[in-house]
Amino acid sequence: MTNRTVTLPTIDHGAITLPEPTWCAGHTHHDPNSLRADLIHAGPTIQCGFLGRPLLAAEIVQSPYATTNTPRLGGRTPGVSVDLLGLTLDSTELYGLAATLDTYADQLRDLADQLAAALAESETR
C-alpha cells in the first residue's frame, strides 16, 4: 500500500489530492488545464528501439477518475499502455527485429509482474 499523495490542479474540480501508487513515476507532464477525468498515473516507460528508431514503448497507466473501468480504454484499473511505430524492413533487418523483440518480450513479462503486483496492492485498499 502507498502513503504517497499528489495534488494536481484541474480546470473543473480545482486542486485534486489523490493517492499515488508506488509504481507511478511522477506527474512532470501534467497539464494544469486538464479535466479531473484526464488525470493519469504513469510508471516508468520501457522502450524498445531498432535501427536507432523507437519502435515500442510500454508503461503502467491508471486514470483514477476515468469514466470507464476498462484498462484498454485508459480506465480506473491499472493497465499497460503500449505504443508501436511502423517500419518497412528487409529480411536481415526483420531477423534483427525478431531478436530485439525476444529481449523486449522478457521486459514485458517483467512489466506484467509489476502490473499484477500493482493490482494486488490496489485490492488491499
Image (cartoon, grey):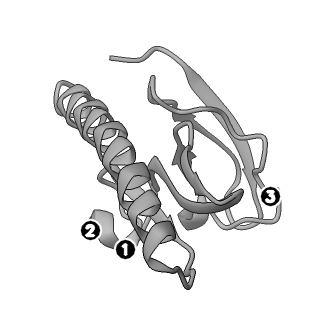
Give, as a three-letter code, the residue at label 3. Asp
Q: Nearer the viewer, mark 3 or mark 1?
A: 1
Residue wearing tag 3? 31
Q: Of 74 and 90, which appears nearest the observer?
A: 90
Residue 48 position in % (x across, y down): 53, 51
| Mark 1 and mark 2 residues within 8 Å of each other at the beta carbon | yes
Residue wearing tag 1? 73
Residue 117's quadrant in the figure?
top left
Q: Of 8 and 56, which appears nearest the observer?
A: 56
Left or right: where does residue 84 sit relative to residue 68? right
As helix, strand or loop, the secondary structure at mark 2 comes to loop
Q: Earlier in the sequence, mark 3 or mark 2?
A: 3
Q: Of 92 and 40, which appears nearest the observer?
A: 92
Left or right: where does residue 30 sit relative to residue 57? right
Q: Residue furthest front?
A: 92
As helix, strand or loop, the secondary structure at mark 3 comes to loop
Q: Residue at x 66, y 67 (%)?
A: 35
Q: Residue at x 30, y 63 (%)?
A: 71
Residue 58 position in % (x across, y down): 47, 52
As helix, strand or loop, the secondary structure at mark 1 comes to helix
Q: Earlier in the sequence, mark 3 or mark 1?
A: 3
